[in-house]
Amino acid sequence: MNTTASQATRPAHQQVAIVTGASRGIGAAIATRLAAEGIAIIVNYAGRKDDAERVVAGITAAGGRAAAIQADVAVPAQVAALFDQASTLFGGVDILVNNAGIIQPGLTMLADTDDELFDKLLAINIKGSFNTMRIAAKRLREGGRIVNFSSSMKTMASPGYSIYAATKAAVETMTNVFAKELRGRNITVNAVAPGPTATELFLKDKTPEQIERLAKLPPLERLAQPEDISGIVAFLVGPDGSWINGQTVRANGGSI
Ligand code: NAP
């Protein structure tokens, strides 16, 4: 047990991060930002290979190290293969960012949610994070970091988001418990809960009027850009974030 030393340093080796759902949106911004901090990046994606390879090309053009690896986070064997390939390519894994997630189409009231949508939201948003964390528990190196993704919707609890919000509540709870289960490993587990952020997930299925109304919710009166969120992840996985553990950072411009 170390009772005195601050952990506020980076390891001597090059850190390696798996960023799930990094082909676009917030995940792509996280991959790009962490690469700029000198971290080697696994750009995970589900189906959009070209988008993932564009993110990798951007990172390597800027002098960073990255590789695109397809894996559906909902499928345990594919998640295991993702970690195996990351270790083979870059020598190990230090950081897991559980960014991959989906939302219901438009507003879907609980009464109108069919079994297929319910199962899909749980499979990707909850089980996907569980699948990666379960392996990370055994595979992350000393000083590792895990950042999960919740949503301001968990707290706003707006009609039409019941199952999505419930999946994010589960992610926040796993974050808090898992941080404690990793006692003695020098690994932190936190979550980020963004408010409306200008990505496909947020923008699709909404009218310009709906987007405008939601953009005006925070006192800062704008949508978040993916880079507003990637900076928070960089802080949590970097030396200055080492004393934050088991927490959810609510990054919503002050809307809730
Ligand atoms: P997005 O633009 O829709 O991007 C989603 C990413 O997740 C894509 O890279 C996609 O890969 C990947 N993905 C989807 N299903 C996957 C699966 N089964 N396995 C692996 N990857 C998968 O979403 P975003 O807005 O950036 O959201 C990122 C995270 O932030 C999500 O957890 C979301 O719930 C959370 N969030 C977003 C907002 C917002 O307003 N945007 C607000 C709060 C929280 P492909 O490109 O290959 O399909």
Image: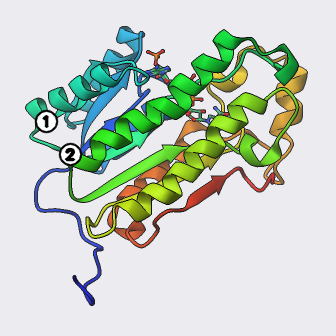
Classify 161 as above or below 115.
Answer: below
- The answer to which image quadrant residue 42 occupies is top left
Say the numbered circle drawn on residue 102. Answer: none
**Which residue in the protein does label 1 denote?**
87
Instruction: Out of 83 and 239, give the one closest to the viewer.
Output: 83
Q: Residue at x 22, y 64 (%)?
A: 10
Q: Residue at x 58, y 50 (%)?
A: 172
Residue 140 in sight here: yes
Q: For the residues marked 1 and 2, what is the alpha-carbon distance in whole angstroms?
A: 9 Å
Asked if 196 appears above or below 174 in the picture, the reply is above
Q: Nearer the viewer, residue 116 or 253?
A: 116
**Can you tell me whether the CB of the residue at mark 2 lies under 8 Å from the nearest atom of ligand 1?**
no
Disc 2 packing (10 Å; few <14; some 14–19; many ≥20): some
Single out the residue that lies furthest toward the bottom.
4
Q: Nearer the viewer, mark 1 or mark 2?
A: 2
Q: Nearer the viewer, residue 42 or 130?
A: 130
- Which residue is nearer to you in this view: 6 or 228? 6
Tell me whether circle 1 and circle 2 mark residues in contact (CB < 8 Å): yes
Residue 61 in the image, given as x and y percentages of width and height: 24, 28
Query: Could you tell me which secondary element the residue under label 1 belongs to?
Result: helix
Question: Where does label 2 land, which residue?
Answer: 139
* Residue in the image at 84% along x and 35% along y: 214
- The kind of residue on which mark 2 rests is Arg
Give how far across and how far down residue 130 sits, in percent: 43, 38
Q: Which quadrant of the frame does ligand 1 lie within?
A: top right
Q: Residue at x 26, y 36 (%)?
A: 41
On the image, the x and y values in percent for residue 199 come to: 62, 26
Label 2: element kind? helix
Q: Position of residue 114 (x, y in %)?
A: 74, 11
> Mark 1 is on which residue type?
Ser
Asked if one can make out residue 192 in the rendered structure from this viewpoint, the answer is: no
